[in-house]
Amino acid sequence: MSKRLILVLTLAFVFGMTFAAYAEVQNIKVSGDLLTSTVSRQMFGLGGSSSVSGDKKSDTENIIATQARLRVDADLTDNVMATVRLINERNWEGETNASTDIDVDLAYVALKEFLYSPLSVTVGRQEIRLGNALIVGKAGTYATNVLNGLPSDLSLRKAFDAITAVLNYDPLVITGLYAKIDGSNRTLSSDTRSENNDTNLWGVDAAYDFGRRGARAEAYYLRKNGDATTATSSSPATTSDKDVVINVIGGILSATPIENLKASAEFAYQYGDMGNASPKKRAYAVQAMADYTFAKVKYTPALGVSYTYLSGDKDSSDNKDKAWDRMYYDQALNNITYAILPFSNMEVFNFKGSVKPKEDITLAANVGLYRLAQKGASTLTGVNVDSNGNTYGNDSNQYTMDSNKRDLGTALDLTATYDYTEDVQFALTGGMFKAGKAFAESNRTTATQVVGSMKVTF
């Protein structure tokens, strides 16, 4: 019965869209992509006995998965556009009602020249990316069941439920944003009342394009507030419970100082209140990148280097929490470390290179050297929770550490891509992470991964 109902609703939706296209829509575009991948993972628990099966943390995982997206962009009246994108992500373990579920990935309306010529407003589920996505790029608020067995670090879902406003005073562009990350109530201990205790993200970003050699400056301020308590019916919250409030201020400078050389540097500082009886947040991040392409050399070789520093908390007994909060980042410095290491308390050097032996073939390598920013912890928790502490996968791994060491390990990614046509691309990626001496011997092993994929866009 449910499948018949879904079919009827789908036909009604298509008919409605067709009718609207004749009645009101000036232009409509349908596009999408289909990604099929085989994933083989070994030793993601790094050999420890505390590893948890399932999701991206399992020691051994072999799956075939399909990720399908269908997008409709409609130009309505002048300066009014609507976008809807549907998504399904699942592995091939078997077909169920859940695994064939279609979810809303994007759903927003864009209003250009809204009330004022330079102003554009976008309302609804949309992707938001600030700078190099060190702070904001992926919401990560999905539940486990919508991924249907797909490792959450491989998900294509990034969108926020948000309102963004852009003031374009070329060459100055100012962006304001508000996103609802999580909505919830908490019961007060004084009586049976409850109060709203949502997690919200506010921000403003200003970017100025100098117009010479790609020089660009960007500054931003972000504020995240959320629940500092985990109230239950037996232990309700009190009216004096404080929310977690994290403020982020930062800036990015980028330029092309010489032809084919792209460089950028970013600094961000976090401050705020971590809730009742908790220290004040005082953390910072630094990131610098440089990439050079030998455009006139045979095989078009390219080289890149980057440095990332995310502060850690050296002394948990003082009144300051200096560990970087990963916010809503969308950076995979290396593939396996993105899946198993928290984006905090680390110092990373990346060295990249690529060549094109043929016009449609690209070979690339990425080496990452990882160290703890601050040593001293006896355990390290994996990354299987979002920045609000809400799990969107199975339980995280707990890695046993050597509190006297800082060497986290070495990562390597090797990738080959083949552009079969303009619309079809094949890719094969092999990766490894060799755990360093900062891990105890029980967790000091090597994790490996092989991913083969075919992507079709239309």
Image (cartoon, rainbow, N blue to C red):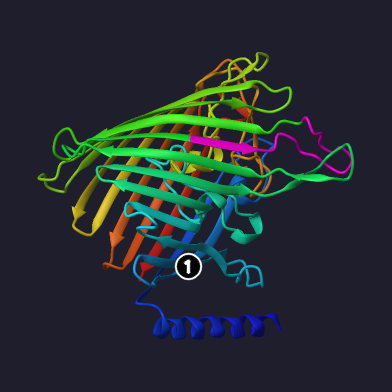
Task: Residue 287: give x, y in percent of width and height.
Answer: 38, 29
Q: Is residue 364 above or below residue 7?
A: above
**Secondary structure mostly taken by the magenta-highlighted segment of the chain:** loop
Would you say residue 266 is visible in this rendering? yes
Q: Is residue 161 above or below residue 320?
A: below
Q: Residue at x 36, y 68 (%)?
A: 457
User: On the image, which quarter does residue 258 sit in?
Assistant: top left
Q: Amino acid at mark 1?
A: Val
Comparing 228 with 435, the one in front is 228
Task: Residue 251: give x, y in percent of width and height.
Answer: 37, 31
Comparing 51 with 20, the one in front is 20
Left or right placement of residue 299 versus residue 318 in this view: left
Question: Of all residues shown, which one is farthest toward the front?
Answer: 115
Would you say residue 371 is visible in this rendering? no
Screen quadrant of the N terminus: bottom right
Q: Which residue is mark 1?
A: 84
Q: Is residue 248 above or below residue 2?
A: above
Which contiguous range is marked in magenta? 222-240
Comparing 340 with 101, the one in front is 101
| Element at label 1 | strand
Report if residue 225 lies within the magenta region: yes
Q: Residue at x 62, y 61 (%)?
A: 146
User: On the image, which quarter does residue 350 sit in?
Assistant: top left
How would you rate the neighbour count of disc 1 (Cα within 10 Å): few for under 14, some for 14-19, many for 20 or more?
some
Left or right placement of residue 189 versus residue 76 in this view: right
